Each structure stands twice: as C-alpha cells, then as structure tokens.
Image: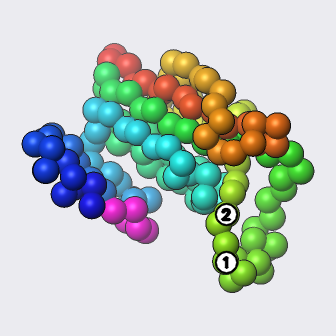
C-alpha cells in the first residue's frame, strides 16, 4: 500500500522492505530511516535485532528517526514467560531501556543527535516513549 501511495503521489527514490526474518541479515543502504509505532510491538530481543539492522543499513551522512518506549511502569521481560504467553494474542507493548538504546547506537558506529520524549506509545504517566535522531557521520 505504501509503495502504491508513493507512486500515486509521483514520489520516487523511496525503497520499501518487507520486515521478515531476512531483515536480520541485511537491509539495503539507506540515507534516511523512519520508524514510528513499530518497534514497541516486538519483544526486547527482537527490538534490539531490528534496531541494529536498521542502523547497520544507514549510510555515512545518513539520519535515522526512531520512536520507541524506553520505560513502562511495572514492565518486566522474561523470554520463558513470553514464549508461554505469546499464543494468547493481543497487541503487545514492550520497551527497550534508554541505557540499552544508547549502547546499541554506540556499538553501531552511530551517534545520538537528539532525544525527545513523546506520547506516541500511550499514557505518558505509564509509558515513557522517546523519539531519537541518530546519525552516521562521515569519517
């Protein structure tokens, strides 16, 4: 649908990637990445893999704009509990601690340019969500 909409608007130069297990291998090189209301619906281990894959694809001089929750009151993640409960269905909401987010950005050879709290993930009194601007600088 996004590809069709872009074509209808006469927009070109946009690449679309279907998120499946191949995303963990590689994405095409990108000048700009935008992710909003996506990562939060994946458990933290997958959230980390997706974020690393996105940042690996960022070209020198490129910018990524990524939104994700970094704190949820009372949130705990256990892989065994998750695997046991995953069949229950419903919309999942997860978070990735800021400290871990910063570590992934650093390990990916990128730099945090800006961080803003937002209300994209729901009630700000319960969920702390951040939009981060991440850059890969030219050497």
For the stretch drawn in magenta, the main secondary structure is loop
- Numbered label attached to residue 22: none
Image spot of residue 37 (x, y percent): 54, 48
Image spot of residue 111 (x, y percent): 50, 22
Q: Residue at x 55, y 29 (%)?
A: 132
* Label 2 residue SS: loop
Q: Quadrant of residue 18?
A: bottom left
* Label 1 residue SS: loop
Q: Residue at x 70, y 54 (%)?
A: 94
Instruction: Check the image and report above or below for 93 versus 69.
Output: below
In contact (CB < 8 Å): disc 1 and disc 2: no
Quadrant of the rendering where the N terminus is positioned: bottom left
The residue beneath circle 1 is: 89
Image spot of residue 51 (x, y percent): 51, 46
Q: Residue at x 69, y 57 (%)?
A: 93
Instruction: Check the image and report above or below for 112 versus 58.
Output: above
Q: Is residue 45 visible?
A: no
Quadrant of the rendering where the C terminus is positioned: top left
Q: Residue at x 27, y 42 (%)?
A: 29
The residue beneath circle 2 is: 92
Does 118 lie within the magenta span?
A: no
Q: Which residues are magenta?
A: 18-22
Q: How is the image coloured?
A: rainbow
Left or right side of 125 for 9: left
Alpha carbons under labels 1 and 2: distance apart: 8 Å
Instruction: Check the image and report above or below for 5 versus 69.
Output: below
Given residues 32 and 56, the one toward you in this image is 32
Mark 2 Cα-neighbour bin, 10 Å: few <14, some 14–19, many ≥20? few
């Amino acid at each position: 649908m996004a590809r069709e909409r872009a074509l209808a608007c006469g927009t070109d130069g946009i690449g679309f990637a279907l998120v499946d297990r191949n995303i963990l291998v590689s994405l095409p090189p990108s000048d700009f990445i935008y992710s909003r209301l996506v990562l939060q619906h994946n458990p933290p281990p997958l959230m980390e893999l997706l974020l690393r894959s996105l940042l690996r694809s960022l070209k020198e001089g490129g910018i990524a704009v990524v939104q994700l929750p970094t704190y949820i009151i009372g949130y705990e993640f256990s892989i065994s509990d998750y695997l046991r409960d995953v069949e229950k269905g419903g919309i999942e909401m997860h978070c990735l601690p800021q400290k871990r987010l910063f570590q992934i950005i650093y390990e990916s050879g990128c730099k945090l340019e800006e961080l803003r709290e937002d209300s994209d993930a729901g009630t700000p009194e319960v969920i702390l969500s951040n939009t981060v601007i991440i850059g890969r600088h030219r050497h």
